[in-house]
Image (cartoon, coloured by chain):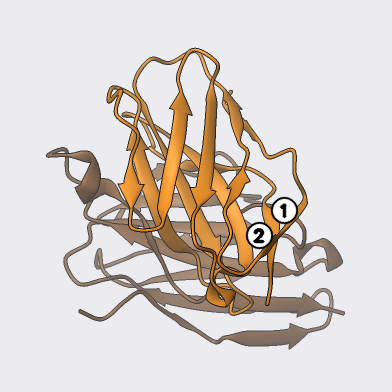
Amino acid sequence: AQTVTQSQPEMSVQEAETVTLSCTYDTSESDYYLFWYKQPPSRQMILVIRQEAYKQQNATENRFSVNFQKAAKSFSLKISDSQLGDAAMYFCAYRTQGGSEKLVFGKGTKLTVNP
Amino acid sequence: EAGVAQSPRYKIIEKRQSVAFWCNPISGHATLYWYQQILGQGPKLLIQFQNNGVVDDSQLPKDRFSAERLKGVDSTLKIQPAKLEDSAVYLCASSLGDHSGSARKTQYFGPGTRLLVL
């Protein structure tokens, strides 16, 4: 079974600076997808960024980028120019290609942004 | 485009009572998911529907949980009888669900229903 591990329960960053959130996963599959979701106190899960495993190029969405290391099964999220609105729980998630295609989530990292 | 709608947003019940949650997915989304998120953990899939058929319910506690999506659009999740450990946020998500590309399978989440069982 696939597992997702987020080893940092909490992180903090100063406004305007850069922070990296770590995620590792375990799978025997070669084709899959990885996601970072943001969950503010409202509890709604918001998609931040998506990476297809077959793509070597790291995904980027404005201030958010990933470092995808397939061999190491590592998928970290970098947030540049951190803003107060970035404060939230961040969840790393894995999705299989085919089958039920359910999302398997890590336990999350709570990000605090200090003014 | 309207997002995934869920109701109620909050519910407090006593153990052994029953409760039902409702979800209306994004228009045109064939696949609907129910996740349970216990405090301090990531969401865990309870059940997945493709149109009105069940794709995966392997982690649904079928002795007390049931779900349906009769017309392939909105869905209800029921707990009867509730236990203390059912206190959680119940998240509904939907996706287009076809096979034409990963972007079309991206799951979009509703605001969730926060359940407290006393």
Res. A20 image quadrant: top right
> Residue B41 has which mark?
1
Chain letter matching colour orange: A
Res. A43 image quadrant: bottom right
At label 1, the amino acid type is Gln
For disc 2, the chain is B
Residue A12 place in picture, x, y as percent: 73, 60
**Residue located 24% across and 68% down the image:** B71
- Let me know if residue B80 appears in the view: no
Residue A4 place in picture, x, y as percent: 62, 34
Quarter of the image for the N terminus of chain A: give it: top right
Q: Is residue B102 left or right of residue B93?
A: left
Q: What residue is disc 2 on?
A: B37
Proximity of marks 2 and 1: CB atoms separated by less than 8 Å:
yes
At label 2, the amino acid type is Gln
Quarter of the image for the C terminus of chain A: give it: bottom right
**Residue located 70% across and 77% down the image:** B115
> Residue B98 has which mark?
none
User: Which structural element holds mark 1?
Assistant: loop
The one nearer the camera, A22 or A16, is A16
| Chain B visual colour | brown
